[in-house]
Image: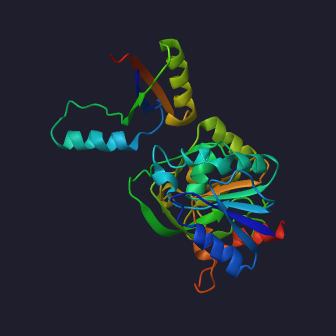
Amino acid sequence: MKCGIVVFPGSNCDRDSFHILKEILGLETEWIWHKENSLKKFDLVVLPGGFSYGDYLRPGAISKFSPIMKSIIKYAENGGKLLGICNGFQILVECGLLPGVLMRNISHAFICDTVPVRLENDQTPFTSSSSKGTVLKLPIAHADGRYFADEDTIKELNDNDQIVLRYCDSSGTVSDENNPNGSVTNIAGIVNKAKTVCGMMPHPERQADPLWPNIDGQVIFKSLIQST
Amino acid sequence: MLAKIHVTLKDGVLDTQGKAVHHALNDLGYQEVKGVNLGKYVEVQLDGLSPAEAEERVREMCQNLLANPVIESYRFTLDSQE
């Protein structure tokens, strides 16, 4: 399995992702500089977290016009697996590979915390190593993580089983009290219709090194390995 | 030519920043404030375009980059600069 991690100016979780994929999971992993025009053959491309282009204008708004994004959009449209984490998720909604938008947290605060999220769909390449209803504890660190989409889009996401993670309490109950950023119906992560493009605000790569007692984040990467 | 562009949230999209400013103004004693909408103001200097061309190009810029059509609307004026 060959993985590529895109590096934008302002990416800051690229090394964490690289560390987990290459050193912890032993996968062949390469950097992809945002100025490259063509994409080599990869089994997984990661758009990492951070503040690409300083979040100027809107998070992800300028990154979507980086030279590499044309090839990445083509790769995704041809069924290539693409994972956007945090700022990567923001880029995916800006470039239209995923529906909706990520707005300023309802509290206006930058939230840095480790929160429970419930796995809503285990029939995707990003989640198949676990089972529906499992509660994962994953870190979040964002100011603009409030997922929003109009009612029709939310209905479509539900109808097509595109919601993969929801914020919840430690027992898996989804409620307003356990919604850290005000996302519509507690959405923390979604996939596209084909289930090959996934965006999530939580950081699985920050909770996947066995140096920590909690390695819940490995679920995402192990699923990807299984499905490749 | 100078394009003066306003980008604001569409009706029905929760404007948390506008709400916070609204509350702050009320707290300062401005009880007459009944609503605040926060948006962005962008000035774009243009060269070598007729007003009709500028209108079309600026609309494109708004659609492609300056506004996110999912949640934001935009309006602009074009000023000819002497």
Q: Quadrant of the C terminus of chain A?
A: bottom right
Q: Position of residue A46 (x, y in %)?
A: 67, 61
Q: Is residue A115 above or below residue A88?
A: below
Q: Position of residue B52 (x, y in %)?
A: 52, 12
Q: Is residue A73 above or below residue A48?
A: above
Q: Is residue A194 above or below residue B22?
A: below
Q: Residue at x 73, y 59 (%)?
A: A121
Q: Quadrant of the N terminus of chain A?
A: bottom right
Q: Position of residue A68 (x, y in %)?
A: 67, 51
Q: Position of residue B49 (x, y in %)?
A: 50, 18
Closer to the camera in the image, A37 or A45: A37
Going by the image, does A180 lie left or right of B23? right
Tell me if residue B16 can be seen.
yes
Q: Residue at x 61, y 48 (%)?
A: A66
Figure quadrant of residue B1: top left
Tell me if residue A216 can be seen.
no
Closer to the camera in the image, A55 or A214: A55
What sort of colour scheme is used for the picture? rainbow
Closer to the camera in the image, B43 or A211: B43
Report the label total.
0
Q: Is residue B39 above or below residue A203?
A: above
Q: Residue at x 79, y 55 (%)?
A: A80
Q: Residue at x 67, y 54 (%)?
A: A36
User: Which residue is the extreme one toward the left?
Assistant: B29
Going by the image, does B36 lie left or right of A168? left
Going by the image, does B81 lie left or right of A216? left
